[in-house]
Image: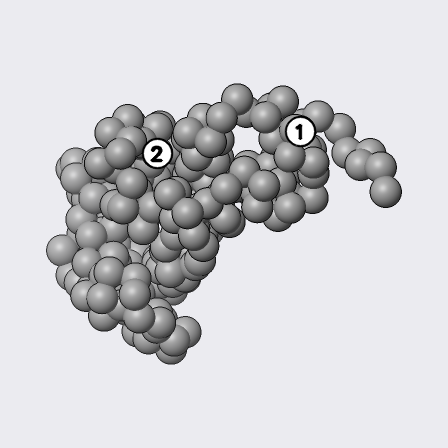
Amino acid sequence: MANTRGGGDRRQAILEGAFTVFARRGYAQACVKEVAAEAGVAKPTVYNHLNDKATLFRHAMRAAAQTVLDERLAALDPLKDAGGDLRTTLQDVGYRLLRLHTEDRACALRRLLYSEITQFPDILDIVSESGPHHLTQALADRLARLALAGRLRITDPDLVAEQFLALLTGPLEARTRMGTRPIDDAALHDLARTAVDAFLQISGPTDDHESGK
């Protein structure tokens, strides 16, 4: 059957297929033939879009990192209009971020980064182009707006955003043994609730503001 996908679609399929194969096999054991089969294209098509295996790996990692970032940025959307209960909104956002942090793509991205960085010293820079600092900056912007509205008591949104994310992911990494053990949904909700409670103890609004005095 002829492949009728356009060039952009084929390239995207190749990158997604490549990441799946690299995550499953590791760089050394992965082969372009397997990537082509996973992507549903002919092997020469892979080489037409990406010259060699190393280039394929770098581009697959960049694309995966961007997808992970886009999903996490979308998880912050409830903070754009946090007009209701702030604690509930923060817990919802925290839970979404934790769930995304434990999804297969994000875990595979971290594993590949750790395992292949010796062979590919530039891979950290490549992944960092769509790395956590973008999420921190976006969260800092949301928190700064909440502070201006009197919903939070903070003076350094960038630092507070880093601290909030650390409250979420620090315990998560310990409980999952760096992503090697599964964690259930109830535990994710519990971690989000605990992180938000600690966060609001320090940065939450005053009682007077909450009561409208």
Residue at (54% x, 38% y) in the render: 32
Q: Is residue 37 above or below residue 158?
A: below
Q: Residues within 10 Å of mark 2 (few under 14, many from 20)?
A: many
Q: Could you tell me how far apart the alpha carbons at marks 1 and 2 are, in whole angstroms?
A: 25 Å
Residue at (31% x, 70% y) in the render: 181
Q: Is residue 111 above or below residue 33?
A: below
Residue type at tag 1: Thr
The disc at residue 45 is 1
The x, y position of residue 101, in whole percent, is 36, 55
Q: Is residue 76 above or below residue 32?
A: below
The x, y position of residue 177, in whole percent, is 22, 66
SS state under label 2: helix
SS state under label 1: helix
Relative horizontal placement of residue 60, taking residue 6 as reference (left or right): left
Q: Residues within 10 Å of mark 1 (few under 14, many from 20)?
A: some
Q: Picture quarter containing residue 88?
A: bottom left
Name the residue carrying label 2.
Answer: 127
Q: Are marks 1 and 2 in contact (CB under 8 Å)?
A: no
The disc at residue 76 is none
Q: Picture quarter containing residue 144?
A: top left
The answer to whether residue 47 shows anywhere in this view is: yes
Depth check, front residue: 120 or 182: 120
Tally the marks.
2
Relative horizontal placement of residue 17, taking residue 87 as reference (left or right): right
Residue type at tag 2: Val
Give the quarter of the figure containing the C terminus: bottom left
Please state which of the two labelled residues, at mark 1 or mark 2, is closer to the viewer. 1
Does label 1 or label 2 sit earlier along the sequence? 1
Relative horizontal placement of residue 33, taking residue 125 as reference (left or right): right
Give the quarter of the figure containing the N terminus: top right
